[in-house]
Amino acid sequence: MSRLIVVSNRVPPPADKGASAGGLAVALQAALRDRGGLWLGWSGETAATEAESEEIKTRVEGNITFSLVDLTKRDQEEYYSGFANRALWPLLHYRLDLADFDRRDTTGYFRVNAFFARILAAQIQPDDVIWVQDYHLIPLAAELRARGITNKIGFFLHIPWPPADVFFAMPWHRRLLEAFTSYDLVGFQIDYDAENFVNCLVREGLGRETSRGTFKAGEREFKIGAFPIGIETAEFTSVAVEAEHNALVKRMAVSLNNRKLIIGVDRLDYSKGIDQRMLAYERFLENTPSAHGKVTYLQVTPKSRSDVPEYAEMQREIAETAGRINGAFSDIDWVPIRYINRTVKRTTLAGLFRMADIGLVTPLRDGMNLVAKEFVAAQKPEDPGVLVLSRFAGAARELDGAVLVNPYDMESTGGAIAGAIEMPLEERIARWRSMYDQLTRYDVNYWCESFLKALETQHNVPAFGSQN
Ligand code: GDG
């Protein structure tokens, strides 16, 4: 098997640092270990000068080499906080109202991609297979090709791809679309994203689909497909079972005092619809007085991207909404919302999911949403909780046992909460079983293997939907 090279904006911290790696990092490291590999990315550190950022920091763990580079402050501002997080992130989440298209940031984005390509090109061997992760690095293959690299290069986008008329609002949309044509495989979370993307290429006159999943642009032919990402299902289930003995989880159980638990867990991000979710919960409280004092909604929301102004603003808004609802509905011995604005340990989270009666996952737009899958994996088979899931999360395409909601419609989302609380045990078990079976078959290792197979072989990309 040829060596695998993974490139992503950030590289996971060393195994011995105590931080528990997420499912994606675990799966990619497993693939790298199987075949030997290299993982390249930004260290997260700031280089004082451009010359300093040229120094590659190398770390070896078994047969995996991690190569990290620092970025200058200007690079971070333009490439990362600027173009990636203030232009691409909102745009690809359908939020033109929040997108900031800045010429200087764009230049920085392409410059940093060229820099990564230069660092990487020097380390590539003829048989290596390269897998580029996510929206920070779209131009990487084009930059590598310009340096004479002919290896197989795949790209996976973790976030959604919007319809053409949304994407075309980006002033540099054509340059980005052209950059995609340098890959051998471009993977998306779900079929709707892949379809939107093909439509962008066609409308921009960049070529045509020769067969389903194969696109011809000039002389180059490349594959496009949907590869819904999974979690480490079995492992997450056993963490959740173990966590029943966790002291913090026990404290939570005592403090609940037999109330029903509703849980929401999201990075602080406008795509996650946290404010709208609290308003839906407020509708539920207004419409269901009998539930007062009998439910607790726990929202865990670690801070993220605080250097981007929209995020600081949103943090204030959500805290205000939670405070206002608590002020209006609390009693001397009951608070309807417990809002935690920091990270909770992964094991604790798994235990809280297991204890919860409802998982509230209502993003306005989400590539997949792993929280939805983790919630399902953590449930007790004999008494599972109900997943209330936004139809605009990629996960809704797979998790057919969820109660699907439109997160913009607070009245009916509130109604779905009421329905989930009342749902009979038999229905809960049936819904949960079908979702859990799906998650066991299509876990994160399946995702990893199916992408690499499509990249390395002549096989057609798997037709998404046929897995159901
Ligand atoms: C992007 C796409 C796609 C959250 N809070 C805590 C915590 N988390 C963990 C969750 C989950 C992960 O972070 C979040 O994953 P999501 O998938 O929900 O969302 P994004 O971060 O936006 O991820 C998304 C994903 O990429 C993968 O392709 O699904 O659509 O947007 O694992 O559990 N973990 C801990 N403490 C917390 O407080 N330990």
Image (spheres, rainbow, N blue to C red):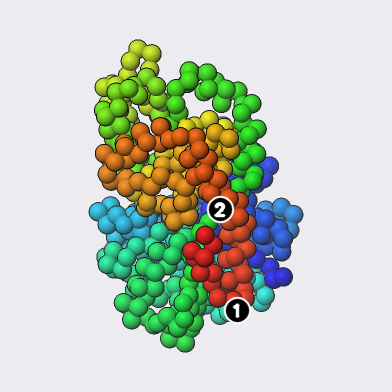
Residue behind label 2 places its C-beta within 8 angstroms of ligand 1: no
Residue 275 picture location, percent across and down? 31, 38
The residue carrying pointer 1 sits among few (fewer than 14), some (14 to 19) or many (20 or more) residues within 10 Å by Cα, namely: few
Q: Residue at x 25, y 54 (%)?
A: 97
Q: Amino acid at mark 1?
A: Gln
Horizontally, is 370 left or right of 326 in the view? right
Report the residue at 43% width, 52% height from top.
396
Per the image, the residue denoted by label 2 is 438
- Measured as percent of width and height from the top left, residue 159 is found at 43, 57
Alpha-carbon distance for marks 1 and 2?
27 Å
x then y, percent, for residue 343: 49, 35
Q: Which mark is residue 305?
A: none
Q: In the image shown, does 268 or 249 lie closer to the viewer? A: 249
For badge 2, the amino acid type reads Gln
Q: Please, what secondary structure does the residue beneath circle 2 have?
A: helix
Say whether residue 79 is visible: no
Residue 290 seen:
yes
Look at the picture and state if 99 lies above or below 221. above
Mark 1 residue CB less than 8 A from any atom of ligand 1: no
Is residue 333 or residue 310 the one in the foreground?
333
**Residue 65 placement, left or right of 86:** right
Circle nearer the N terminus (1, 2): 2
Residue under the image location 47 percent in, 60 percent down: 189
Q: Furthest-top residue in view?
A: 332
Residue where numbered disc 1 is placed: 458
- Most extreme residue toward the bottom is 219
| SS assignment at label 1 | loop
Q: Is 203 or 379 nearer to us in this picture? A: 379
**Residue contact at pointers 1 and 2, CB within 8 angstroms:** no
